[in-house]
C-alpha cells in the first residue's frame, strides 16, 4: 500500500503534463478559422480572390515582427 500513493501521484503528474497544451497563437487570433478548408483544392486553383483565415500544420522556423505585421516562416 505504501508504493501505491507515490505511483498514483507520479501517474497524475505525467498525465497532466501530457494533457496540457501550449498555444502558440492567442485565442483571439484563432477565432473565425475555416476548419473545412481544403488546402489541396485551393492549391490547384489559387486565384487570391477570396480571403480566408485557415490553420495549417507545420513547424515554426522563424518569425519577425515589423510594425503591425508579423511574418512567420514554417516548414511542412
Image (cartoon, rainbow, N blue to C red):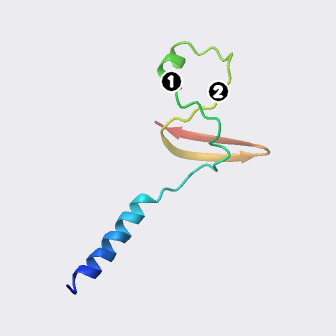
Q: Earlier in the sequence, mark 2 or mark 1?
A: 1
Element assignment for label 2: loop
Residue occupying the point 23% across, 80% down: 4
Element assignment for label 1: helix
Camera-nearest residue between 71 and 47: 47
Residue 40, position as x, y percentages in the image: 47, 20
Residue 41, position as x, y percentages in the image: 50, 17
Residue occupying the point 68% across, 24% down: 51
Residue occupying the point 36% across, 64% down: 15
Disc 2 target residue: 52
Q: Quadrant of residue 73?
A: top right
Horizontal side, residue 39 vs residue 53: left or right: left
Q: Residue furthest front?
A: 1
- Whole-number angstrom distance, CA of label 2 to CA of label 1: 11 Å
Crowdedness near tag 1: few (<14), some (14–19) or many (≥20) residues, C-alpha within 10 Å: few
Disc 1 target residue: 39
Crowdedness near tag 2: few (<14), some (14–19) or many (≥20) residues, C-alpha within 10 Å: few
Amino acid at each position: 500500500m505504501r508504493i501505491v500513493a507515490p505511483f498514483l501521484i507520479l501517474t497524475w503528474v505525467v498525465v497532466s503534463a501530457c494533457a496540457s497544451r501550449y498555444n502558440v497563437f492567442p485565442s483571439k487570433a484563432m477565432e473565425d478559422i475555416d476548419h473545412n478548408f481544403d488546402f489541396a483544392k485551393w492549391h490547384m486553383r489559387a486565384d487570391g480572390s477570396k480571403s480566408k483565415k485557415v490553420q495549417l500544420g507545420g513547424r515554426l522556423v522563424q518569425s519577425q515582427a515589423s510594425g503591425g505585421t508579423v511574418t512567420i516562416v514554417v516548414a511542412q
